[in-house]
């Protein structure tokens, strides 16, 4: 992380990370319009969420189910281009789309924004709008709007069909506070007893351990290391019974730093091996855990 500019978020988040850098596929983003609404519309013509596919009448093939393992924007764009080399501005037929998830939507939108010098970052946390009285594991993108002097939250996954099914009436391109909560906010809610940690997660995976993972993934994303939802390292890996009081104190501090937009969060990340993403992580796939060396 370039320490010389992290205290200036408008500068720091306007440049690519190793994950969002399109590399040799940079040209594919050259004709993307600067309007966020148009970017999201383009994204929704490229992606089909793997969990929603059957709602669109599509059953993913085994090969299509592997799309979600693409960790970098470079690899996402490679897959999209291999499936259909048309310009990204041309919507793909459903069967020719990239079968991704919320993180993939968010990381590509982040890349589109950064490609135009717009400060953007991917956030890991939980959404309140998928299941009533539940905080669903989710990722979104936010960008800095200089005119209103604030970060604007965008959920690029939610297209017309999904909004109709979920009964969503709020603006998904400028989400109101509380619809999405970050991993840090979730951690504080659960640790303070304001919310039951068993209400946070996805499928049968839930609890404080799950919130801990999203807290640390969000910290990594704020340090421009936007990994997969099932990538684990450091304090994400330990069982609850294995964590010490010092571990919980550190995680409480991280949550407060993130919520308070404190620049110290970058230093805490860099200085703690239990938080910082190492060169080799563990990624949980359908075939179980495997070591992955990050590029």
Image: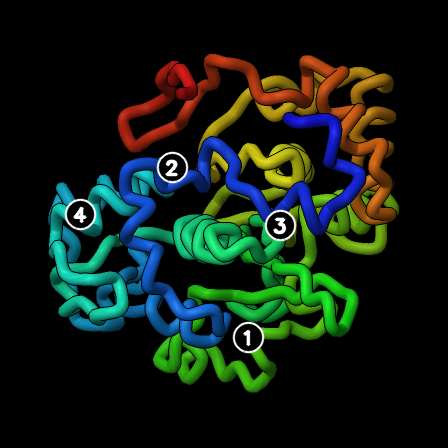
Q: Nearer the viewer, residue 164 or 177?
A: 177
Of labels 3 and 2, earlier in sequence is: 2
284 on left or right of 194 = left
Query: Which residue appears at 36% of the width and 41% of the height?
Result: 22
Of labels 1 and 4, earlier in sequence is: 4
State the image coordinates of residue 78 (x, y, percent, origin top left).
Answer: 22, 42
Residue at numbered disc 4 = 64
Q: CA distance from mark 1 to mark 4?
A: 27 Å
9 on left or right of 172 = right
Residue at numbered disc 1 = 172
Residue at numbered disc 2 = 72
Q: Judge whether 93 appears above or below 6 on screen.
A: below
Determine the secondary structure under disc 3. strand
State the image coordinates of residue 278 (x, y, percent, origin top left).
Answer: 55, 15
Q: Is residue 209 visible?
A: no
Callout in the foreground (2, 4): 2
Residue at numbered disc 3 = 125
Callout in the foreground (3, 2): 2
Q: Nearer the viewer, residue 99 or 262?
A: 262
């Amino acid at each position: 992380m370039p320490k010389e500019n992290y205290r200036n978020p408008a500068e720091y988040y306007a440049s690519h990370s190793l994950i969002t850098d399109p590399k040799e596929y940079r040209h594919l983003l050259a004709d993307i319009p600067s309007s966020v609404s148009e970017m999201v519309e383009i994204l929704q013509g490229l992606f089909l969420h793997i969990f929603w596919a059957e709602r669109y009448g599509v059953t993913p093939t085994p090969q299509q189910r592997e799309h979600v393992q693409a960790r970098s924007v470079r690899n996402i764009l490679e897959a999209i281009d291999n499936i259909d080399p048309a310009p990204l501005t041309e919507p793909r037929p459903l069967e020719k789309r990239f079968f991704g998830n919320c993180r993939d939507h968010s990381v590509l939108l982040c890349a589109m924004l950064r490609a135009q010098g717009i400060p953007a970052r991917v956030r890991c946390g939980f959404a309140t709008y998928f299941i009533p009285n539940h905080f669903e594991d989710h990722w979104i993108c936010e960008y800095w709007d200089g005119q209103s002097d604030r970060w604007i939250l965008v959920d690029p996954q939610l297209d017309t069909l999904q909004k109709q099914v979920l009964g969503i009436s709020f603006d998904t391109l400028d989400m109101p506070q509380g619809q999405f909560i970050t991993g840090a906010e979730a951690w504080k809610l659960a640790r303070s007893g304001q919310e039951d940690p068993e209400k946070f997660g996805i499928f049968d995976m839930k609890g404080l351990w799950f919130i801990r993972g999203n807290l640390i993934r969000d910290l990594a994303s704020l340090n421009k290391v936007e990994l997969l939802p099932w990538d684990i390292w450091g304090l994400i890996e330990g069982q609850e019974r294995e964590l010490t009081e010092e571990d919980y104190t550190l995680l409480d501090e991280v949550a407060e730093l993130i919520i308070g937009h404190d620049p110290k969060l970058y230093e805490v990340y860099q200085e703690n091996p239990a938080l910082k993403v190492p060169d080799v992580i563990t990624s949980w796939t359908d075939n179980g855990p495997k070591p992955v060396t990050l590029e």
